[in-house]
Amino acid sequence: MNVTKIKFGTDGWRSIIGEDYTTQNVARVSEAVAVWLLENYDLPSVVLGHDCRFGGELFLQTAAKVFVKNGIAVKYAKGFVSTPMVSLGAVRYEASLGIVFTASHNPPGYNGYKLKAHYGGPLSPAKVQEIEDGIPDHANEYRDFTWEEVLETGLASSVDLEREYIDTVRNAFDLEAIQKSGVRLAFDAMYGAGQNVVRQILPDTKELHCEHNPSFKGQAPEPIAKNLQELSAFIKASKSIDCALATDGDADRIGLYDAKGEFVDSHHIILLLIHYLVKYKGMTGKVVTAFSCTPRIERMCKHYGLDHETVKIGFKYIAGIMVDEDVLLGGEESGGIAVKGHIPERDGIWMGLIIWEFMAKSGKTLDDLIEEVYEIVGAFKFERSDLYITEELKQTIIANCKANKYTSFGKYQVQRVETTDGFKFFFDDDRWLMIRPSGTEPVLRTYAEAPTLEEVREILRICEETITH
């Protein structure tokens, strides 16, 4: 019998439900986690939560059985919860680990297994590797153990992680100021695990896709423009929304829309957050961003006298620095952002609330605030295009990048290349293109920035033409 080799990627282990993502394989991973916990902690404990996907409760209970069999205390969320809720829960309950059964923004057929450290952020890559190296070929301990028997041991108890998260939000934000400001808001949960939060804290907010639908209507719950057409159309049709927030399947990533129904990318969001936290709230600290982010973040950091560091893609690299250093903001191009004063974890709703509070307190529109950012870093546009190509072609393109085969893309001459994580081709100070294989999906990602959207799309088109022919 072939044993599936389980590998943790950029952000946890993810696989297709019923193929590799089975109770047996979830139990194998949990067995490795249990052994690791017992080696590293005198009295280990875990906080468990699952998102809205198929089988969430089944997979959570499977893992809980393995932990309880190993004498490990379990606190589990009843019903679906977001990743930030579990990360916050790990801190609140002083757990050794938080575990989230989620495939985040992946298509509906997937599920996954995320490991969160005691500090409420991704477990370090070295420790994840230790667990991965210990995954056994089989795990049968859970099969003859009923859920009733698990509860009878007294080692497992339920906790209300959503309630605790909402209470934390209420204490951190001036929700009254947002309510009274007259700012008209919308929230698209993409059928994800953040769907219950906004209606409880800001009940006047218009809602889209805030009901339980494990198939996400067949749509990958990733908050990028091509997946949020309904939200954009809703804003344009209603003409009465000032800003809209969207979050992904496990609500750790943010998508944002302006009053015109136009997508506001993560680079702009990161710049807005730094601008607000420093200029308006008087906060300081280092800024850490992933390799795929705009160089304009560095420009803004220089403007405000902040240290800036670029790291490889994967929020775990940012979280590690946030735990050890005084970090104001850590962020990725894909919508995962964390800020000082909260856990070292991506949190889409939290970031959206900062922007909404910024609008409410300043009395300015989102466009006005973006103009303030442009005054510091210059106007720009950005877009990402995912190329679904054969593995063979993907490897050829990466080999060509490594061999410096691409010295120009059409009329765009490459001035320099950065290779921290992928290949970033700079044409001048305001234009660049990046090529990188995804760490979680079978795609080649291409990214571009330029002063206008037309030019961004032209660069992406020329890039695809150049590398696929």
Image (tube, helix red, strand yellow):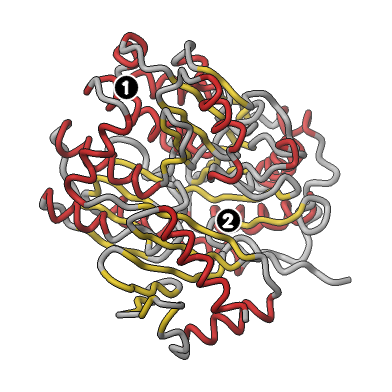
Up-down relation of residue 431 to residue 192 (above or below): below
Q: Of marks 1 and 2, which one's residue comes earlier in the chain? A: 2
Question: Marks 1 and 2: CB-CB under 8 Å?
Answer: no
**What residue do we see at 61% from left, 32% from top?**
230
**Which numbered marker is on residue 185?**
none
Across the whole image, how many numbered discs are drawn on residues? 2
Q: Nearer the viewer, residue 129 or 96?
A: 129
Kind of residue at badge 2: Gly
> Which residue ends up furthest to the top in the rendered image?
180
The picture places residue 247, in percent across and down from the top left corner, at 52, 36
Quarter of the figure with the C terminus: bottom right
Q: Nearer the viewer, residue 83 or 335?
A: 335
Comparing labels 1 and 2, the label whose residue is closer to the camera? 1
- Element type at marker 2? loop
Q: Is residue 76 visible?
A: no
Residue at 14% across / 56% down in the picture? 302
Please tell me whether residue 334 is drawn above or below residue 144 in the rendered image: below
> The disc labelled 1 sits on which kind of residue?
Phe
Q: Residue 120, how many percent across, how many down?
A: 42, 42
The residue identified by callout 1 is 173
Q: Position of residue 357 (x, y in %)?
A: 30, 24
Q: Residues within 10 Å of mark 1 (few under 14, many from 20)?
A: some
Looking at the rendered image, the quarter that the N terminus falls into is bottom right
Q: Is residue 207 left or right of residue 123?
A: right
Give the Cα distance between marks 1 and 2: 30 Å
- SS at mark 1? loop
On the image, which quarter does residue 422 sit in?
Answer: bottom left
Q: In this image, 390 relative to 436: left or right? A: right
Tell me the residue that label 2 is attached to: 12
